[in-house]
Each structure stands twice: as structure tokens, then as C-alpha cells.
Amino acid sequence: MTEGEIPEITITSASEARTEETTTPASGASTIPRAERKNPRGYNALQWAIRDKKVNDLIKDYPNVCPLWMEWIVDVIDNKPKEEIEKIILEGLWEKKLKSRQDARVIKGAMQIFANQQELLEYERTKLPAVADRNLSP
């Protein structure tokens, strides 16, 4: 360069500089392969989107129900024939009798269940001789 010549300067904007930095070869965490969604039913991208929308709507409508159950029911309804679903509903094939619920009972020892304190005291007097000597009034 001779005297009096103006040196050539290239000006790059900040966004261009950032672009150049990000286009460099990847290294570190970006080279780790990402997890892929399991697809045992062979859904395509559109079917996944529809299924996710149905599951999200159910989660909003029933917030106290496990989201995994929502996914299962959507898969069942989408993949079973309508006749089979109607049969399950009408004949109650998936229904079962509820177990009776316990009501404030005392569990003692080897899973002995007593309805009240009096039954517990009676059990201790008759079945446990060492306890019978003590005064066990309620």
C-alpha cells in the first residue's frame, strides 16, 4: 500500500458475525444424538399431532387423571374397531367390582385390623398375656 491510498475495510454486522460463529463445525453437546420418540404403532407426523392434541385436551378436561392413562385410552379408541369398543362399554368388560374401603381402623402387629379401640384392647387382653397384666383402660 502506498502513501495516500485508503485501505479497504470490510464491515460486518453483529448478526453476520454471529451467523459465522454458529456455522462452524459442531462440537460438544450438539454432537450427542437426541432421543427419538418410540413409535410402536407406526404413527406418522400428522397422526402424532392429532393424538397429542386429543391427549392435551383430555388432560385439560381431567387434570386429576394420570396423563399416561389419557395416552392409553386415546390409543385404544383410535386403534380398536367401533364394534369392539361398544361391546366393552355395553357389557362392562373392563369394569370390576370395587374393593370395600377401610374406615379408620387401627392396624396392629401382623396386619390385625380392629374397628375400634375396644376391639384392640380385647385382643391385647386375650391374645397377649404379657400385656394383660397392665391396666389398659381407654
Image (cartoon, rainbow, N blue to C red):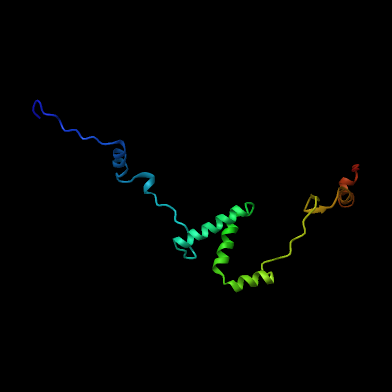
What residue sits 55% from the left and 66% below the top?
78
Q: Could you tell me how many numbered marks the image carries?
A: 0
> Is 24 positioned to the left or the right of 55 in the image?
left
Q: Quadrant of the N terminus?
A: top left
User: Can you give x and y, in whole percent of width and height, for residue 70 in the image?
Assistant: 59, 58
Q: Residue furthest left?
A: 2
Classify 121 as above or below 81. above
Considering depth in this image, is 27 or 41 the residue closer to the camera?
41
What residue sits 28% from the left and 41% below the top?
20
What residue sits 44% from the left and 60% below the top?
45
User: Can you give x and y, in whole percent of width and height, for residue 25 in the image?
Assistant: 30, 46
Considering depth in this image, is 95 or 89 the residue closer to the camera?
89
Considering depth in this image, is 41 or 77 the residue closer to the camera?
77
Q: Quadrant of the C terminus?
A: top right
User: Can you give x and y, in whole percent of width and height, for residue 125 in the image?
Assistant: 89, 49
Classify 105 as above or below 83. above
User: Can you give x and y, in whole percent of width and height, for residue 120 in the image?
Assistant: 86, 49
